[in-house]
Structures are given as C-alpha cells and as structure tokens.
Image: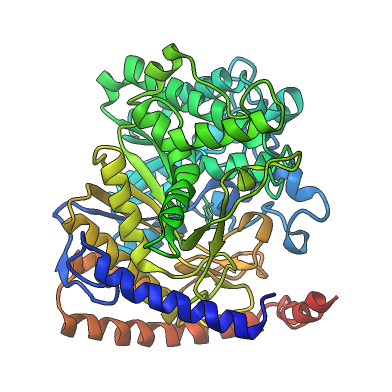
Amino acid sequence: MLPQSMLRTCHLLVLMLCVSAIEDFDWTKNDHGSFYYGVFPTGFSWGAGGSAYQTEGAWNVDGKGMSIWDAFAHKKGKIFLNDTGDFSCEGYHKVKDDISLMKDMNLKHYRFSISWPRILPTGIKNENINEKGIRYYDDLINKLLENKITPIVTLYHWDLPQILEEKYRGWQNASMVNLFNDFANLCFERFGNRVRHWITFNNPWSIAVEGYETGEHAPGLKLRGVGAYKAAHHIIKAHAKVWHTYDTQWRNKQKGLVGISLSGDWGEPVDISNQRDIEAAERYVQFYMGWFATPLFNGDYPQVMKDYIGRKSAQQGLGASRLPVFTAQEKSYIRGTCDFLGIGHFTTRYITQKNYPSGRGNSYFTDRDLAELVDPRWPDPGSEWLYSVPWGFRRLLNFVKKQYGNPMIYVTENGVSEKMMCTDLCDDWRMQYFKDYINEMLKAIKDGVNIKAYTAWSLLDKFEWDEGYSERFGLYYVDFRDKNKPRYPKASVQYYKSIISSNGFPNQRELESWKGKAIETCSSSNQLLAAGKSNTSHYRKLKAWPVHDEV
Ligand code: NOJ
C-alpha cells in the first residue's frame, strides 16, 4: 500500500498529465470529456456475448467430456469460494429463454463459443464425435437464425479437453495445432452452412499468460518466462492453420469469415513528454495485443518483443531467446490470416519505464521493463482490475487502425462488472460505462477506424473464471442461488436497447429520457428479484456470505 501523501501526489501528477494530454491529443477533435452526438453507419451490428464454460453448465451431461476448466475448478483453492461452472447459468437447458432475451433487446448478433469436449469428448476427431453435443449447437444456431440473430462463433474460449492436457500438456505441445485444426474443421463441416463468422481463439493472451505463466487459470501451470511464449507460439500457428483450412476447403461454399479475438488494455504514457515512458507504453501494448496481432498481420512478433526477450535471455546465459522463432516459411503462412480482428477491451493503464535486471526470476511481466499505474479517481465498480477509462478505447482502436492497415474490426467484448453482493438492478455505473465507451467507439469510427460490430459483454451474469461468481458482468442478473437460475433485466438492458434502436446517440434530449426510462423498468425488476429471493430457501445463504468472507 502506498502512503496517503504519496497517493495524493501521484493523483495530482496524473491530473496534470491528463490536462496536458488533452492539449497534445492531436488526432482527436474533442477532448476526453466531450460527448459526440451522432449515429453509427447503417448496418452496424449490435450484439451481446457469452462463452460455453461461463454459461452452459451441464458439465457432464449428454456425453460431454471433461475440459481443463472442469478439472481446474474441481480442485480446492483455485476458484473464489471454490465455485465451479458445473451448473452456471444452465444455458445448455435455456436456449429458448435466452434467445427471447436477445430478441427483446433487438440484438443483431450473439457471440457464443463451442465447447470442444462437448462435441469431441476425447478431443480427437477420429475417436468419438458426440452427436448430442452437435445437436445442442445445431439447435442454438437454428433458433438464433429463426430470430434473425447472427451467430458469431468462437471455437476456443479456453475449455481445452482435459485429456489433451494430460497427454500433451495442452498448448505447450505443437501437436495441438493439428488437433485443433481437426476440431475446427469438424465445426466448419457441421455448422458452416449456417455460421458465417468464426473466431478461432478468444483472448490468447489470457490462455498463455494466466494458463501457463501465472497459473491463475486452467491448466494452472507456472512456467515463468517460457510457458506463455511457447503456448502463444502454438496458438498463433493453430489459428493460421485453421484460417488456411477454411480458406482452401470451405470459403468458396460457405462464404464466411475467420478472425481471432484479441484482448488489449490501452497503455498511456505517464509522462507524455518523456521518451522512455512513451516507449514503455508502446511496449505494453506490443506485449499485449501486438504479441498476437503483429504475426497475423505482418508475419512475425513485434520487434520490441524480439529485442527485449532476446537480450534478457542472452543476459541469463541462455543459448536462444525464450521467445520462439518463426521460420521464413511459417512467417509467410501466418501473415494475412485474419479476415477481421475481434477486439475485447475493458480498461486502460498508465505506463512508466521501469528496469528489471535480468536474472533467474524473469517472467513475461519483467521482460517488459515497465510499471503499470492507475488514476485513483477512475471509477472501478466491480472487478479490481477494471477501471472505467473510455478515452483509452478510442486510442486503442486508432492504434489498431494505424499498426495493422485499418483492418475490419468486430468489438467482441466490452463491458463492466459489479460485485456479487450487489443486488441493485438499477446499474447506473454500467449505463454510464456503455454510454461512454460506445461513444468513444463512435468517435473512432469518425476517425476512420473500420468497426463493424459491437458486442456488449455479457448477456448474463456468469462464471468469471478464477473469480467464480463474485463479479457480475451481465446485462441480465442471474440468481445463482435458485437452481432454476432465473434472469432479471438490469437497467442497462433498457439503456442498451435505446442505443440499439437509435443506432447511436441522436441528441441530448433523447439521451436524457433514456436513463429515466431505464430506471423505471429496473425498479420493478428490483421488486421481482426481491420477491423471487424471499421465495427461495437459498435466501438465508446470502446473509451468511459476508461471514464466510471474513473467515
Ligand atoms: C475476457 C474473457 O474473454 C471473458 O471470458 C471474461 O468474462 C472477461 N474477460 C471479463 O473478465
């Protein structure tokens, strides 16, 4: 913890920097605070999303195999309150209900993921195809289409078949490239006549860093300084292989698109007049989104990653860089394998230069030679890491435009959470977040960034990985204590609906009326939720939770 006086000084420093940043921000016509009234291009697609392990439940139903998340969550001490995704939102059994929620919001698309072990219980195509699993996704896709909602389908949202982890050490092993390609090929074969938008991987940064470097996520390996780079290397090759498979075998017939969804926080230099901070902030973004985007758009890792990791590896006395190398052939195979770029964005950091002398303790984090800071005044209603900094979104989008040749962008995740104990459905912090972030996205479109779609994250409250159910990202509140997992609309449902029906922000007067309308609807949902609660025997548990927390 920093002493109060130091915090205050940092606070002031950051404030001063913000002010000067506004003046120097030359590619914007507006400062951070100004609101831009206007509408999105015709045909802009508004959606919401979720993922298999986070929402489906039914972990061992109808022939599904185990995933690394089933195994990880079942181990004690890995997930907050030892919760699991065993039942989650019971999405597997509620396809119809959930589609009617989407329909009510007038969503144009829904983003979901296919659980690999649900359709290939042993992970391997030649061994056993689980037709019941296929039927579930068939049904989901068909019902979406019947309701004129476009499915955007992610092939890998982190739930690797457990058996592949046991046999091969998952993404540490190059065999995964072909196995994933077989799985993807099966999906194209079975669903591709109806699905036009494919995302190979969701947020490979998390798969690599949290799965194989810090071990906070499944499979929980702590292979510091090496594991994440290796996992990422295989993921990038797997993505490229799947793109080529689609391109050569399916594209003509199915006429779809294959992209990837990368997450990226924006990194803003603490001192914009200090070259070292500017470079540190650039490094932060390159080590985050650039790690994956640069190979896919330009054929190789960002130069700065090669330099930093290479130099540190040499100083450690290693014969080769801990960052793997692509051969010339691989580079040309990987380059240009993104029909669209999916972006998941939630927050921003201030970045300053900080040296970490290389030694045995090197990790992905120390390889970057930087420190992350936040402005204590940034709102952070839910997840500890998630500060609301809307202007960072516009900067990230412009960065992508400039770095990767203005690719077609689908915003695949954007949203904010609140804490588990919060049962207030009048979520004005989320309305504010959506309003401001979507407005920055609109400004980015005016800057010339090629954004085609926006996906609010998420449709429902759901399993938040190592945080269990303690962080609620949903537009809809899910009462997890009730075994039927009823959904209740938060005020942001109504607010998002207004944005969708106006296709943006038409004028001040209209906008002012949106919030009032949203609050009206949430007051009645609050009553429903309260009534629902008192009807469930689980209600007493709610009172016990803080006691549990104190233990
Ligand atoms: C990114 C992940 O892809 C998603 O599954 C998760 O819900 C959000 N981050 C929020 O933590």
Q: With 479 as the anchor, is 32 left or right in this view?
A: left
Quadrant of the rendered structure where residue 267 is? bottom left
Q: Quadrant of the N terminus?
A: bottom right
| In-front residue for pair 440/182 | 440
Image coords of residue 48 (percent x, y): 39, 56
Image coords of residue 442 (percent x, y): 23, 62
Q: With 536 as the anchor, is 448 left or right in this view?
A: left
Quadrant of the rendered structure where residue 197 is? top left
Q: Is residue 74 visible?
A: yes
Q: Is residue 200 visible?
A: no
Which residue is at 50% across, 21% downward? 181
Q: With 396 as the anchor, is 465 left or right in this view?
A: right
Quadrant of the rendered structure where residue 373 is? bottom right
Q: Give the residue furthest to the top.
A: 329
Which residue is at 58% across, 58% downward? 89
Image coords of residue 359 (percent x, y): 73, 40
Which residue is at 52% across, 19% downward? 182
Total labels: the figure holds 0
| In-front residue for pair 89/42 | 42
**Up/down of 384 relative to 100, above or below:** below
**Up/down of 41 relative to 191, above or below:** below
Model colouring: rainbow
**Up/down of 399 relative to 106, above or below:** above
| In-front residue for pair 277/528 | 277
Which residue is at 32% across, 49% downward? 399
**Up/down of 145 relative to 531, above or below:** above
Q: Quadrant of the C terminus?
A: bottom right
Image coords of residue 115 (percent x, y): 56, 38
